[in-house]
Image (cartoon, rainbow, N blue to C red):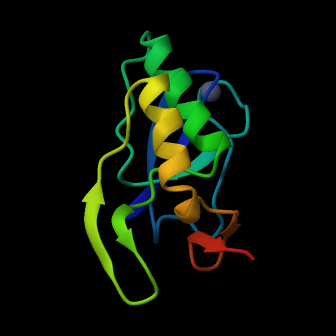
Amino acid sequence: MGYKKVCFTCRKAFSVYKNEAPKANLTCAQCGNTTIIFSHLFKPPKQNDLKRWQVVEFLKDHGFVYQRIYETYTDSILAGQKGYPETITEAKKFILKYKDQARLLIWDDDKKEFVRVG
Ligand SMILES: [Zn+2]
C-alpha cells in the first residue's frame, strides 16, 4: 500500500508506493507543480470532470484527503466506514458531520504517511 500524489493543475493522481523512494518526490511528472498527498483510497474523477475535481479540492481544503472516515469515531471505536461525497452539496454536509475527523496534517516523510498534529 502506498499513497497518491495528486496534481490539481493536471487533474491527475499518481500512485506512489511506500518503499519506492527514500524521499517523496512531490513534483508532478507532467507539469512540474507541487502535488498534494492523498491516501491510496482516492480514486480520481475523469480529468475533464471539473465538478468532481472541485469537490475533491473542497474536501482537501477542509482536511479530507481520502483518509478513512467512520460513522462512529471515538478513541476506542471506529465503525461504519463512510464513502466520500461526490457533489458540493453533499461535501458541505460531510465536512460538518465529520469535522472531528478532518486532519490538520503534516506529511511525515520518514513514515510516508500523514501525521495528525494538535
Ligand atoms: Zn501537474
Point 42% across, 31% down: residue: 90
Point 49% across, 56% down: residue: 98
Residue 71 spot, x, y in % from top left: 33, 62
Residue 67 spot, x, y in % from top left: 45, 59
Task: Choose between 90 and 8: the one closer to the eye.
Answer: 90
User: Relative to residue 99, is residue 115 depicted above or below?
Assistant: below
User: Relative to residue 9, is residue 105 depicted above or below?
Assistant: below
Left or right: 80 with respect to 54? left
Point 48% across, 51% down: residue: 97
Residue 116 spot, x, y in % from top left: 65, 74
Point 27% across, 61% down: residue: 81
Left or right: 113 with respect to 14? right
Left or right: 76 with respect to 26? left
Is any part of residue 88 visible from this angle? yes
User: Relative to residue 58, is residue 77 depicted above or below?
Assistant: below
User: Relative to residue 98, is residue 30 depicted above or below?
Assistant: above
**Image-quadrant location for residue 70:** bottom left
Is any part of residue 65 visible from this angle? no
Left or right: 91 with respect to 117? left
Q: Residue furthest left?
A: 80
Q: Quadrant of ligand 1?
A: top right
**Image-quadrant location for residue 23:** bottom right
Image quarter hosting the C terminus: bottom right
Q: Residue furthest bottom?
A: 76
Image quarter hosting the N terminus: bottom left
